Structures are given as structure tokens and as C-alpha cells.
Amino acid sequence: MTNESDDKGISRKGFLTLAWLKRQPPIKERDDLPKTTFKTTVALDELTRLETGAVMKIDNVSGIYAVRILEGIIFVSNICPYDGAAITWNPKDRSEDLLAKTGRFYCQRCSTIYDRTGEVKVGPAESMLNKMSFLPANDQVMITDRVVGESMSETGIFLITE
Ligand code: FES
């Protein structure tokens, strides 16, 4: 005795599921899903050791810095949101914020100065550096390629309680 799925090699439900999946655009092109590819990860204990005002380059590839603010950590991209210029962190320059005495971001292409949280202090750039979204995962924090602000529910701050 055979059933329907043996005869045709696949059940009607399985066939319909496959047909539906084949009609879906690739995940990259779907705008109903949040983009969650990961740019980099950082160990949780490295983050919790940072003191207020500290700025830590996470790696040499992602262009992301972990910045300790009062409430916790934000992840600031050093890539210019307009043209992709790499903005440098100058730890010895005068600070533009109240979190520490020294350190600010500087764009060598257009001379824009940003404070450690990515806010523009001296133009010509008009908008702040991107803060990146993250997902905590056990003893690590995974930083995504999504910019904070795409979802209303996220603050972009990895909270650290003293
Ligand atoms: S070129 Fe974009 S901030 Fe300078």
C-alpha cells in the first residue's frame, strides 16, 4: 500500500511549501526582514572593563568602536555615512564631550570633527556617525550591520549596571 507522498515523491503540503519558497526573493532583497548579518563580535568582559569615556577599536576590519558612555556601551561606526571615508579616532586630541578630557573622531577628507559618541562638533558633515545595532550572545556581543534607529524599539545602548 502506498500513500500520496510515496507516489509523487513529495506531499502536496511539501510541494506547496517548496513552490512558495521558490517564489520568495532572496533574503537580501526582502524588506520585510531586518538585515542581521554580523560585522564583528566582542567579548563581554572586554566591554565591562571599559571606564566611562573609554573608546576601544573592536578590530581592524569592521570600522566599529565600542564607546563607554554613562549608561553603558554604544557601537560607533567610523565610516562616513555619505561617502565611506574612514574617520580616525585621535585619542590625544582635545575632547569635544564631557565624558573624558581627550579624544575625538576626525575626518581627514573633509576635516569634520566628531565627539566620541559620533555627534558632529565642527562640520562640514551634517549628520552624526552611525551607531550600530547589536545582539548579546552568551559571553559575547555581536554587532550587526544595521544602524540604530531603523527600529523604534532599540536605544543602541548596551546597558551596563555598576
Ligand atoms: S567625507 Fe564624510 S565626514 Fe568627511
Image (cartoon, grey):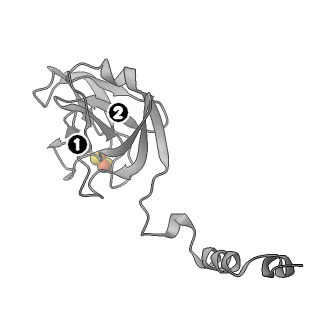
Quadrant where the N terminus is found in the figure: bottom right
Quadrant where the C terminus is found in the figure: top left
Q: Quadrant of residue 53?
A: top left
Front-most of 137 and 75? 137
Helix, strand or loop for disc 2: strand
The residue singled out by tag 1 in the image is 112
Q: Residue furthest right?
A: 1
- Tell me if label 2 and label 1 are in contact, CB under 8 Å: no
What residue type is disc 2 on? Tyr
Front-most of 106 and 135? 135
Mark 1 beta carbon near ligand 1 (under 8 Å): yes
Left or right of 127, for residue 65:
right
Front-most of 80 and 54? 54
Q: Position of residue 14 (x, y in %)?
A: 69, 75
Helix, strand or loop for disc 1: loop
What is the number of the mark on residue 65? 2
What residue type is disc 1 on? Thr
**Residue at coordinates 63% horizontally, 75% vertically from top-left?**
17
Q: Residue furthest left?
A: 98
